[in-house]
Amino acid sequence: MDIRELLELRSSRLNADFLADKIEEDTDIFDVVWEVVLEDSDPVSMRAAWSLVIFSKKHPYFIESRIPDIVEILPKVKSTGVIRCLLNMLTLAPVPENQSGILFDYCFGVIESVSSEIAHKAYAMTILYNISEVEPELKPELIALLEAQLHDESTGVGARAMILINQLYKDLGMPVRLSR
């Protein structure tokens, strides 16, 4: 069975894990799966991206060379499932300095948008925090953005924002806010 046939089967964690294991056995398969992700055609591209997330969680160093590609294509991707997976992958590895500005702006926009999915916002928050670890002068701006999310209709977004706000306060030597 080839990769595309596997991806066209019913979506399941078992299939995603199977493909991630195949990538571990032969990392050249990563490129094949990546090409399917780039097609941005649901549901196959989302399934391919999910397999890459599973693989990347085991081997985050492997995606470091792909980060510029991910940052470049992310604003063009239409599939919400692919966006979610790409953002998830970006939380796993350090962002190159020359990509951090573009990614910061993209993630800032995701968080500010009322139409962004909850998972997209949560991953974007983590990415922004990771960038602020390398560029600490961004921490106050990130605190302001996250504080604006505390009253979001989603408990998950508010909770994630609170966790990161408390960490940012600690990072800056400020008293921690304990709750929303």
Image (cartoon, rainbow, N blue to C red):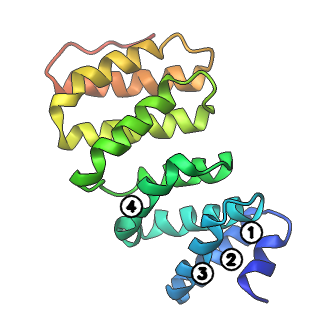
Q: Are marks 1 and 3 in contact (CB under 8 Å)?
A: no
Question: Height in image: 99 above or below 106?
Answer: below
Q: Which numbered mark, 1 or 3, is in the foreground of this view?
A: 3
Query: Which marked residue is nearer to the observer: mark 2 or mark 3?
Result: 3
Work out whether 15 lies above or below 143.
Answer: below
Q: Residue at x 36, y 13 (%)?
A: 178
At numbered mark 4, what does the secondary structure look like: helix, strand or loop? helix
Cα distance in 3D space between marks 2 and 4: 24 Å
Q: CA distance from mark 1 to mark 4?
A: 26 Å
What mark, if any, has residue 67 been given in the picture?
Answer: 4
Marking on residue 14: 1
Q: CA distance from mark 2 to mark 3?
A: 15 Å
Q: Residue at x 30, y 55 (%)?
A: 94
Of 154 and 107, the residue lying toward us? 107
Label placed on residue 32: 3
Quarter of the image where the C terminus is located: top left
Graded by Cα atoms within 10 Å as few (under 14), some (14 to 19) or many (20 or more), the crowding at tag 4 reads some
Please tell me whether mark 1 sits on a helix, a strand or a loop. Answer: helix
Q: Are marks 1 and 4 in contact (CB under 8 Å)?
A: no
Who is closer to the viewer here, 65 or 89? 65
Estimate the spatial distance between the alpha carbons at disc 1 and disc 3, rounded to whole Å. 19 Å
Q: How many angstroms separate mark 2 from mark 1 (CA)?
A: 6 Å
